Image (spheres, rainbow, N blue to C red):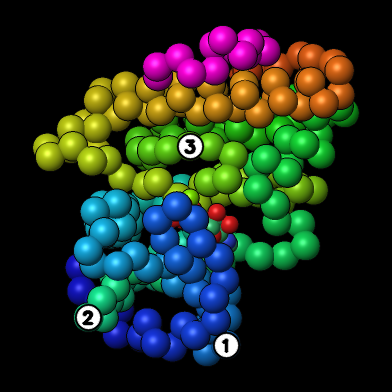
Amino acid sequence: MAQNPAFKISDFDRYFSRGTDKVCYISEKFPGKLLKISPLAKANQMIREIQYFEYLTTKGISPSFMPKFFGRCSDKENIGFVQELLVGNNIKSLIDIVRRYYLTDLAKVEDALMALKNEMLEKNIIVLDLHGANIIGDIETLKLWIIDGYGTPEFIPLPKYFRFFGRMKIERQWKKFVYRYSLLVTGLSREHGVWMPSKIASGPIEPKERHRPR
Ligand SMILES: Nc1ncnc2c1ncn2[C@@H]1O[C@H](COP(=O)(O)OP(=O)(O)O)[C@@H](O)[C@H]1O
Ligand SMILES: [Mg+2]
């Protein structure tokens, strides 16, 4: 898919945030939009993600948890894409959301997470690297978005095209998420001195289990 000519990297002149791979910028010219870029020399993950967004766009698949995709853009040094900017006083990372609800209403957060997983399965959406910083949400309504990790790295990406392989991949990625989520709630249970019942976490994780291969 071609570049979106409406966007120039140089227009996005205000730094917004960074993660492990990408740097994000905003622009007064484009309210509600976020540019994410990676240097061309380290762009494998970025290219995989762009191709996946373009694939979903072509197929008309738009999961409710996916920020809107507005197209790719690049210059001599960077490649990236523009997506819906999710901001507001209520928008927090899953880590903050779980922290807020841990003692009172963890089940509500977990219902929202299960709905996310069900939609991934239903629409065969592959997301790698699911963890508390790559899921954000509205801390009041508990509407959640997955903001990072879309796509699949296989040379022949069977999970992308065949639901059978897609389901296996989604379940494997979910298992990894459950482990990370269990670490998160284990931390909170220590902080508060109480283990809250959980429909998702695999139980408190003992220190000796923390480095188990996944
Ligand atoms: N659509 C978005 N709206 C608001 N903030 C976002 C959005 N996407 C990413 N962010 C913020 O930018 C950070 C880095 O983005 P991310 O896509 O996770 O990059 P990386 O691949 O480097 O981890 C996120 O942790 C989050 O705080
Ligand atoms: Mg990230």
**Mark 3 CB near ligand 2 (8 Å cut):** no
User: Residue 20, how many percent across, how many down?
Assistant: 45, 52
Spatial CA distance of label 1 from label 2 is 23 Å
Please state which of the two labelled residues, at mark 1 or mark 2, is closer to the viewer: 2
Work out whether 11 lies above or below 145: below
Spatial CA distance of label 1 from label 3 is 31 Å
User: Residue 61, how many percent across, how many down?
Assistant: 37, 50
**Residue 109, disc:** none
Number of numbered labels in the structure image: 3
Based on the displayed image, in which of its 4 quarters is residue 110 positioned?
top right
**Mark 1 CB near ligand 1 (8 Å cut):** no
**Which span is picked out in magenta?**
202-214
**Residue 130, disc:** 3
Query: Is 4 left, or right, of 10 in this rendering?
Result: left
Based on the displayed image, in which of its 4 quarters is residue 116 positioned?
top right
The amino acid type, in three-letter code, at marker 3 is Leu
**Residue 28, disc:** 1
Spatial CA distance of label 2 from label 3 is 31 Å
Query: Is 139 left, or right, of 35 in this rendering?
Result: right
**Residue 76, disc:** 2
Viewer can see residue 48: yes
Report the front residue among 74 and 166.
74
Report the front residue among 96 and 139.
96
Mark 2 packing: few (<14 Cα in 10 Å), some, or many (20+)? few
Viewer can see residue 33: no
Q: Quadrant of the C terminus?
A: top left
Q: Residue at x 53, y 21 (%)?
A: 179
User: Residue 205, how many percent across, how many down?
Assistant: 62, 13
The amino acid type, in three-letter code, at marker 1 is Glu
Mark 1 packing: few (<14 Cα in 10 Å), some, or many (20+)? few
Q: Residue at x 86, y 24 (%)?
A: 192
